[in-house]
Amino acid sequence: MVRHHHRMATVDGVMRQRGALVEHPFGTLKWWAVINFFLIRGLVKCRGELNLMTHCYHFMRALKEVKVTAFIADCQARMVLQGGRV
């Protein structure tokens, strides 16, 4: 227990790294989805729900970087290359 507290309290501690990398996306997901809990029960189902939410989060971030019009143009160009198949 003492070793754990020491590890968490150091400047290069795990919690500091975790807070910098993980807490912002989780906070954004909670704000964006307006939920504070999982909607279903069971570990496998909750993992699926979290995976779906994180994929949506990353997709939204990618759309902000690429811009929606460029994304639509790329999708249309790919459809032309595939002969109109989806």
Image: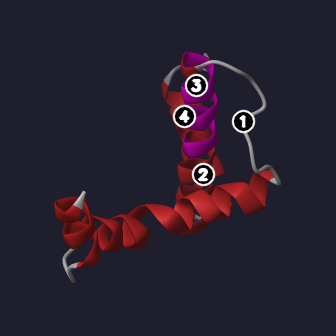
Callout 3 amino acid = Gly
Dot placed on the residue nearer the N-terminal end, 1 or 4: 1
Question: In front here: 24 or 68?
Answer: 24
Question: Could you say where residue 11 lies in the image, as x and y percent from the top left?
Answer: 21, 83
Callout 4 amino acid = Asn
Point out which mark residue 10 bears.
Answer: none
Callout 2 amino acid = Tyr
Please tell me whether mark 1 sits on a helix, a strand or a loop: loop
Point out which mark residue 38 bears.
Answer: 1
Measured in 3D between alpha carbons, the distance from the residue under mark 2 to the one under mark 3, in whole angstroms, is: 14 Å
Point out which mark residue 57 bears.
Answer: 2
Question: In front here: 32 or 42?
Answer: 42
Dot placed on the residue nearer the N-terminal end, 2 or 3: 3
Point out which mark residue 51 bears.
Answer: 4
Callout 1 amino acid = Phe
Question: Could you say where residue 66 lies in the image, as x and y percent from the top left?
Answer: 53, 63
Question: Closer to the camera: disc 2 or disc 3?
Answer: 3
- Magenta highlight range: 44-54
